[in-house]
Image (cartoon, rainbow, N blue to C red):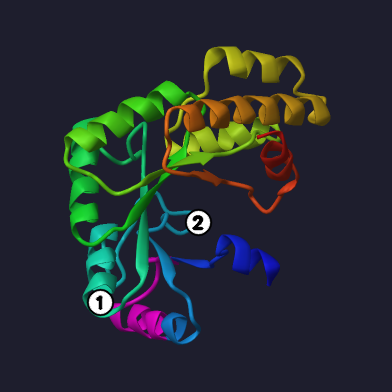
């Protein structure tokens, strides 16, 4: 209660298009609104496990911009969406990915949260391209503290992100020592956050993967 009154802590529901019809999504949105939820992160969603490509449910949505437009047309949520500093893995090139992002924002997005990245220069370059394309909504930087080598390798492959060679080398050198890997990951993420804050980032979103210890440590350091 104290935190809510002092910093306005709010809940954000994550909503995807996976396995849902338009009618079903509408019912979910009605329930969320009735429950006092004010923020929605609207995502297309990943293909179900075992499938390589996303296939829209009959009567559902194939793209996040369609979901955003649907939410924006009937409900009064603050709508967030995803963006990719190194482009979406399914996009043919950075420009086509940016064009898709612009369509999504124009459909009614209020803020963006970036996919994870480990090199701030990639985020700065993306942010500049987005501004030049006329995207004026806040862009929050997505930061994931590295907890172990297998984890980061899996996410880098899945998200289309890249791992700086120097950082990858430091992690590989101590990969059997989980505590050392966590320290390296937290230190790198802290430096990322400091740099982002100095460059006027709109906000920082931490990917905790349900393990908040590293994120809380970074917050304390900042």
Return the residue at label 2.
49
Identify the residue at horizontal 27%, vertical 39% (top origin).
91
Question: Where does label 1 land, which residue?
Answer: 59
- In the image, is residue 122 above or below residue 106? above
Most distant residue in the front direction: 6
Q: Nearer the viewer, mark 1 or mark 2?
A: 1
Residues rendered magenta in the picture: 15-30
Residue 92 appears in view: no
Residue 180 placed where, x, y %? Answer: 80, 25
Quarter of the picture holding the C terminus: top right
Where's residue 125, x and y in %? Answer: 32, 25
Q: Is residue 159 above or below residue 51?
A: above
- Considering the image in quadrants, where does the N terminus appear? bottom right
Q: Residue at position x 42%, y 82% from top? A: 33
Residue plotted at (58% across, 12% down): 166
Label 2 neighbourhood size at 10 Å, few (<14), some (14-19), many (20+)? Answer: few
| Number of residues whose C-alpha sits closer than 10 Å to that of mark 1, classed few (under 14), some (14–19) or many (20 or more) | few
Q: Nearer the viewer, residue 45 or 167?
A: 167
- Place of residue 71 in the rendered image (x, y in percent of width and height, measured from the top left): 29, 72
Which of the two residues, 154 or 112, is positioned nearer the viewer here? 112
Q: Is 118 left or right of 3, judged from the image as shown?
A: left
Name which quarter of the figure residue 28 lies in. bottom left
Q: Is residue 27 visible in the rendered structure shown here?
A: yes
The residue located at (71%, 49%) in the rendering is: 212
């Amino acid at each position: 209660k104290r935190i809510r009154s002092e910093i306005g802590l709010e809940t954000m529901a994550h909503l995807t298009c996976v396995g849902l019809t338009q009618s079903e999504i509408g019912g979910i949105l009605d329930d969320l609104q009735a429950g006092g939820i004010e923020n929605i992160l609207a995502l297309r969603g990943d293909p179900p496990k075992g499938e390589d490509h996303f296939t829209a449910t009959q009567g559902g949505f194939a793209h996040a911009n369609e979901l955003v437009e649907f939410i924006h047309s009937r409900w009064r949520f603050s709508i967030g969406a995803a963006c990719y500093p190194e482009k979406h893995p399914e996009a043919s090139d950075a420009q086509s990915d940016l064009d898709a992002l612009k369509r999504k924002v124009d459909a009614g997005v209020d803020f963006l949260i970036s996919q994870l990245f480990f090199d701030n220069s990639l985020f700065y370059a993306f942010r500049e391209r987005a501004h030049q394309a006329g995207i004026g909504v806040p862009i929050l930087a997505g930061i994931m503290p590295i907890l172990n080598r297998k984890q980061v390798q899996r996410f880098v492959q899945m998200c289309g992100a890249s791992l700086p060679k120097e950082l990858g080398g430091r992690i590989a050198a101590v990969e059997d020592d989980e505590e050392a890997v966590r320290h390296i990951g937290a230190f790198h993420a802290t430096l990322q956050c400091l740099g982002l804050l100095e460059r006027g980032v709109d906000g920082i979103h931490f990917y905790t993967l349900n393990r908040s210890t590293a994120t809380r440590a970074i917050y304390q350091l900042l």
